[in-house]
Image: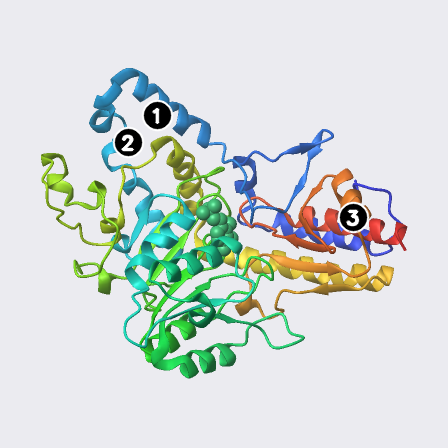
Amino acid sequence: MPPVTTNWPEAQAFLNEARQLDAADPLSKFRERFHIPAHEGRDSLYFTGNSLGLQPKGAQDIIQGELDDWRKYGVEGHFQSRRPWVNYHAFATEDLAAIVGAKPQEVVAMNALTVNLHLLLISFFRPEGKRTRLMIEKGAFPSDRYAALSQLRLHGLDPKENLIEIAPRAGEHHLRQSDIEARIAEEGDRLACVMLCGVQYYTGQWMPMAAITTAAHAAGATCGFDLAHAVGNVPMELHDWNVDFACWCGYKYLNGGPGCTAGAFVHERHAHRPDLPRLEGWWGHAESRRFLMEPDFDLMPGAEGWQTSNAPVMNMAALLASLSEFKEAGMDTLRTKSLALTDFLEKGIHAVAASTGAHLEILTPTDMASRGCQLSVVAHGKGKSLFDHLTENGVIVDWREPAVIRMAPVPLYNRFSDVAEFLVILENGLRESK
Ligand SMILES: *Cc1c(COP(=O)(O)O)cnc(C)c1O
């Protein structure tokens, strides 16, 4: 049954195709392992897994288990609980490493995203002599820009001269690989660090991460990525690409819950480098002697050497529930479905535009190697009433003035039918507002 009464001649074809695709979907069983928010008694059409992933049903048991162990053991739970808290971060390591294409020792779950960005920039943005510049993308997520600006000031550097913001060409929405490479080469020995996003939060562009890393290294700079919108969304090979550092949050595609513990990657090359300055804390101290309370810091190898504090257990518990779903599904299978799901959405948006005469501009690259699951669509000339129409009909998408809809069909829990129903509602809203 279509969600709204529709006069769109193609509606039935899209709904039928979606039903067939769902029936053939090897990942369809995962949807029922997540809580889908309801709208008027039926599942809402949830496309904001890029902002806050849905709750894995396994989260409740894991969190309750930690509460039970705390009640039962008190402080002894650090060693006696079913997942000893003393090493809690390690329960996430292998699955996170598989998701980002890293070796386990290159990955650690800790802190929050922007905090990790700062900790890593302290180590990898080391301005020296004339090599003082930090490159980010223009239109970077505000937190990343604030982090970059404050890191420059921390070194006494004027952001006006030392923050390089690389922008798409006039009239374009995406950074071209050749332009990024040329700009990095042009900056040459003035460039200390390149710190870009993996997937751009606004346009959905997946950056050519391997090429950017190679270009940065050729210029003698370090290279890192903010993977907030890439982790759990696109398959990556951080180790093989030679990326120096990366960080991500746990609550978007990783479904770890609001404010969930974030993650960090540091390449093996840097794993045993006590010479790299860092902000130190006792959880980065040699694990076997951590409780000897020694006065001098003895660095742990690997990404774990960037830890400062003990793990926030409650905050990481839900993440473990989600990671086990990722492990079972596998990033390759997720990516295969994701490509099909987003293609289906893109095809539908073009059909809706043709049917209604609306000018729907997709900001996200068409090329599948340059995008993850998200599409960002501008509904030119349409206003808040379109968004209200979507909301009233149970569609949850991100809306930005003026009429930019960002939506992420997530392969773990979204169905092709969700997309088809969204298209019918969108078509209906555009037809009515004509
Ligand atoms: C979501 C997001 C953040 C959020 O930062 P927190 O430290 O988790 O609050 C930062 N950067 C980017 C690119 C994001 O997409």
Is 311 drawn above or below residue 7 in the view shown? above
How many angstroms separate mark 3 from mark 2 (CA)?
Answer: 48 Å
How many angstroms separate mark 3 from mark 1 (CA)?
Answer: 44 Å
Marks 2/1 in contact by CB < 8 Å: the verdict is yes
Residue at (10% x, 41% y) in the render: 295
Is 119 drawn above or below residue 268 in the view shown? above
The residue identified by callout 3 is: 384
Which is more foreground, mark 3 or mark 1? Answer: 3
Residue at (83% x, 64% y) in the render: 354
Left or right: where 72 falls relative to 373: left
Marks 3/2 in contact by CB < 8 Å: the verdict is no
Determine if residue 321 is in view: yes
Marks 3/1 in contact by CB < 8 Å: the verdict is no
Q: Position of residue 226 (x, y in %)?
A: 44, 58
- Disc 3 crowd rating (10 Å Cα; few below 14, some 14-19, many 20+) is few
Query: What is the three-letter code of the residue carrying label 3?
Result: Lys
How many angstroms separate mark 2 from mark 1 (CA)?
Answer: 8 Å
Query: What is the three-letter code of the residue carrying label 1?
Result: Glu
Going from N to C along the chain, the mark reached first, 3 or 2, is 2
Left or right: where 301 falls relative to 221: left
- The one nearer the camera, 320 or 392, is 392
Q: Secondary structure at mark 1?
A: helix
Left or right: where 347 falls relative to 177: right
* Residue 66: assigned label: 1
The residue identified by callout 2 is: 83
Going from N to C along the chain, the mark reached first, 2 or 1, is 1
Quadrant assignment, res 72: top left
